[in-house]
């Protein structure tokens, strides 16, 4: 009999930015790194004989943490352990998909056997390839213990297949949740599902719960381009409030200069000036400078604003995710921005997103930190 510990990857960009990541390669987040470290402690005294993961970066990063206490192991990868291929949904936003394809979104969340979008993989195909992959590992390691890092949908689909449970009746496992199976005589048996007892306050579900609206509903925003000069009053209000939050007064603030700059950015690409809405309410905006930093390989965020009534629901993270996707597609290695050295709230937010201070500058309204976020997809290793 072979013991198989099937583990969901740590929190990754798609989980944080609220984007379907399927087989899109994304990094794990700062919270995901702490989750992976907790997973390493959980497996510290487990006699693991082999370590496998899908070939995507987020699973390899998670699996690498287990090597801390099992350095004798080699991490192997297998594309058969990947997440479901979501086809044309890859790396779009959940807000967009909920609005434009509500029926297919419902099927994906509750009845994936009926879900299909162009280029997608079927529910049954995911179940079959996951079962084949795990049985192959059991044959390769008879009588051993194997840790396998995979993905939420794939693990849930397999668990439903093995137990005969309807998909809607079995919840997603949390990030780094552990499902324990055994394999014997060509048959998989599920012993426990989705155990995340090692996470405590690091639970992604707990963090997302804090970000839900008053009805407990995921706050998935919908992006729309901001149109200037028609919406110049809205833009100016947001920039003015950002300036006040950063500097405490409006000394040095010039609406004309910032409006002209925003119009230039949007004129080069409408996605450089984007609003985010939640249902019918304006929730915030992001402005990107498509030229600044190009020769040095970084992208520049000129402005992020979230309306006070919509804070603490991860709209800031979703706006930041738009910037990551925009500049990663253009081959940039990092995102940069300036933040006032007195704006402790903004600094804490950016640090929680993975930004670090790489310098300082003297701004019109006072001293600024230059902060940077590495956006190159790469496997993270636990120090």
Image (spheres, helix red, strand yellow):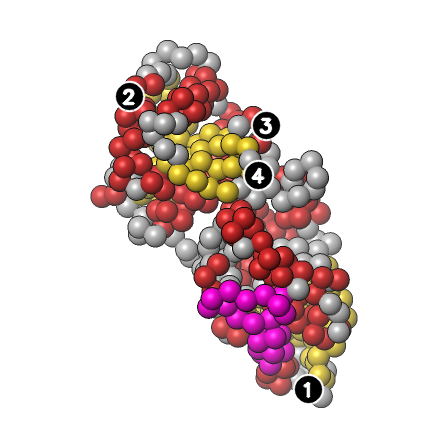
Q: CA distance from mark 1 to mark 2?
A: 69 Å
Q: Choose between 327 and 183: the one closer to the eye.
A: 327
Is residue 44 something that shows in the picture?
no
Residue stretch in magenta: 112-133
Q: Which mark is residue 279?
A: 4
Secondary structure found at label 1: loop
Residue 256 highlighted magenta (yes or no): no
Mark 2 vs mark 4: which is more N-terminal? 2
Give the residue number, with chain letter if any, for mark 2: 257
Residue 182, percent from left and from top:
72, 77
Within 10 Å of disc 2 (Cα), the crowding (few <14, some 14-19, many 20+) is few
Main SS of residues in magenta: helix
Give the residue number, with chain letter if any, for mark 1: 186
166 vs 56, left or right, is right
> Which is in the foreground here, disc 2 or disc 4?
4
123 vs 85, left or right, is right
């Amino acid at each position: 009999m072979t013991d198989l510990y099937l583990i969901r990857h740590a929190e990754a960009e798609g989980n944080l930015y609220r984007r379907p990541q399927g087989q899109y390669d994304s990094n794990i987040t700062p919270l995901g790194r702490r989750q992976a470290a907790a997973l390493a402690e959980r497996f510290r005294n487990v006699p693991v004989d082999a370590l496998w993961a899908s070939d995507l970066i987020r699973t390899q990063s998670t699996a690498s943490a287990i090597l801390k206490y099992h350095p004798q192991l080699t991490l192997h990868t297998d594309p058969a352990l990947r997440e479901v291929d979501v086809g044309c949904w890859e790396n779009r936003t959940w807000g967009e998909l909920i609005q434009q394809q509500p029926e297919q979104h419902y099927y994906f969340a509750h009845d994936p056997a009926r879900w299909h979008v162009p280029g997608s993989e079927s529910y049954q195909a995911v179940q079959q390839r996951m079962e084949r992959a795990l049985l192959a590992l059991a044959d390769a390691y008879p009588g051993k213990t194997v840790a396998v890092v995979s993905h939420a949908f794939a693990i849930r689909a397999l668990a439903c297949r093995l137990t005969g449970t309807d998909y809607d009746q079995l919840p997603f496992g949390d990030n780094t949740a552990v499902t324990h199976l055994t394999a014997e005589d060509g048959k998989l048996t599920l012993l426990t599902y989705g155990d995340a007892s090692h996470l405590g306050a690091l639970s992604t579900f707990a963090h997302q719960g804090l970000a839900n609206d008053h009805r407990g509903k995921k706050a998935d925003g919908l992006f729309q381009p901001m149109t200037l000069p028609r919406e110049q009053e809205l833009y100016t209000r947001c920039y003015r409030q950002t300036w006040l939050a950063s500097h405490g007064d409006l000394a040095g603030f010039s609406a004309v200069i910032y409006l002209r700059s925003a119009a230039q950015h949007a004129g080069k690409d409408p996605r450089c000036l984007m609003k985010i809405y939640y249902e019918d309410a304006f929730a915030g905006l992001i402005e990107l400078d498509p030229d600044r930093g190009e020769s040095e390989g970084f992208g520049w965020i000129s402005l992020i604003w979230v309306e006070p009534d919509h804070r603490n629901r991860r709209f800031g993270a979703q706006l930041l995710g738009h910037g990551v996707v925009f500049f990663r597609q253009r081959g940039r290695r990092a995102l940069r921005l300036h933040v006032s050295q007195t704006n402790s709230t903004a600094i804490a937010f950016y640090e929680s997103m993975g930004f670090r201070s790489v310098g300082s500058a003297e701004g019109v309204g006072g001293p600024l930190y230059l902060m940077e976020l590495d956006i190159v997809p790469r496997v993270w290793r636990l120090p």
